[in-house]
Image (cartoon, rainbow, N blue to C red):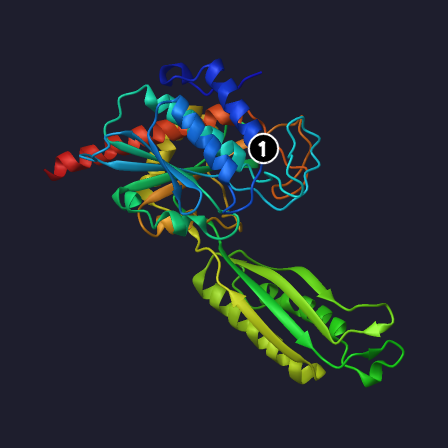
Amino acid sequence: MAYFPKDSRDIGIDAGLIDWMRAIRREIHEHPELSFQEKRTSQFICEKLDELNIPYTNNIGGTGVLAYLGDREKTRGCVVLRADMDALPITENTGLPFSSKNPGVMHACGHDGHVAMLLGAASILKRRSIPGKVILLFQPAEEKGGGAERMLESDVLAEMDTIFAGHIDRHLDTGQIAAQPGLICAFTDEFSITIGGKGGHAAKPHETTDCIVVASLLVMSLQTLVSRETNPVFPSVVTVGKLSGGSAPNVIADRAMLEGTIRTTDPVGREKILNGLKRMVCAMEDLYEATASVQITPGYPPVINHETSAGIAMAAARQTVGDEGLIQLPHPSLGGEDFSFYLNRVPGCMVRFGAKNSDLQTAAAHSPGFDFDEGVLPVGAEFLARVALLALADINVKAQRHD
């Protein structure tokens, strides 16, 4: 059964639009593409914009698309609505009839739904009077590569006054929208550690420096960076996601490599963890007569919702799902989001759209079995349309006061 947001009729949500969005989501899900490779997806989006008779510019930042509604000359405010469109290097096992046809690539984070929602919002806004300019931003490479930074190179986005986006969340019920000011996503840094030593025969460890042992001890030691060296009131995580080394069961490895990520919510804590990581890696050389080096790759900045923009988003959420559907999350996510790059440029807000369904298997985002309740599609489309209209109204009121 289709899920209709509250009072959706007055803004143009009907069964036909829901079916249209569902078909879009499934088409994109069936043909996922990795970061900066979203050529088919981009072309498909342009075809749907043509259906709606909405002008656009494509090939922005590689495969990105910008579409335009309302006042093209921007004599009043400009609001940007963003959806990401890349997939992940995961082999799907959902068993869905529209499962990925691209081996080893899958929409496992809901970006297929984000695109469908934004196109749905485009359909809604196309039929309404818009008191300003709305830019629809279909962004490549959120998962890897920082597509937001590439999109910000476009002169068109220099016009934006504020920006909004939403992300599907399987932890929340369909019909719920989480919206609030402040920090909602973490710093995301990555590290790579290389350990070298003297290899040899497994039966003669005294003649070697066992890099697998050194790497294993380092994995355990790194956990104390969070448990004993950072302020516990600020969430943080150090995860080693990859450990490689060795070539045979009877050979002591002369090299090992660890790769991982650091997620922090406090700038002071972030620096302490980064410095502690370097200290521990250097200590391995003296402790175990190994060579050790670390490379740290800075990740996305944290997503910090602007207070005024969050207030507008909360109002749009109330209009969409009612007071009972608007919630606030007690803790920030330690996930990363390159939406943060936009917020470093202009005020804005990212919300989360509940998409939990008890009939679906329990599978986390970024896992082979991930799926979401498609009832979230009209919720997201209506919210995005409403937040654009409310934000433009707010900009115009403030402009009148200034005049």
Crowd around label 1: few <14 · some 14–19 · many ≥20 (10 Å): many
Residue, far right? 203
72 lies above or below 246: above
Q: On the rendered image, what quadrant is the N terminus found in? A: top right
Q: Residue at x 60, y 66 (%)?
A: 192
Q: On the rendered image, what quadrant is the C terminus found in? A: top left
Residue 322 appears anywhere in the view: no
In the displayed structure, does residue 322 sit left or right of residue 133?
right
308 lies above or below 68: below
Q: Secondary structure at mark 1?
A: helix
Residue, far left? 403
Q: Residue at x 73, y 69 (%)?
A: 216
Considering depth in this image, is 79 or 153 the residue closer to the camera? 153
Q: Residue at x 50, y 44 (%)?
A: 330
Considering depth in this image, is 127 or 278 the residue closer to the camera? 127
Q: Residue at x 63, y 63 (%)?
A: 259
- Residue 298 picture location, percent across and down: 48, 62
Considering depth in this image, is 95 or 396 the residue closer to the camera? 95
- Residue 28 picture location, percent across and down: 55, 32
- Residue 324 picture location, percent across and down: 46, 26
- Residue 212 picture location, percent across and down: 75, 71
Residue 321 appears anywhere in the view: yes
194 lies above or below 3: below
Count of marks, rendered view:
1
Considering depth in this image, is 176 or 160 the residue closer to the camera? 160
In the rendered structure, which amino acid carries the disc numbered 1?
His
Q: Which residue is mark 1?
A: 29
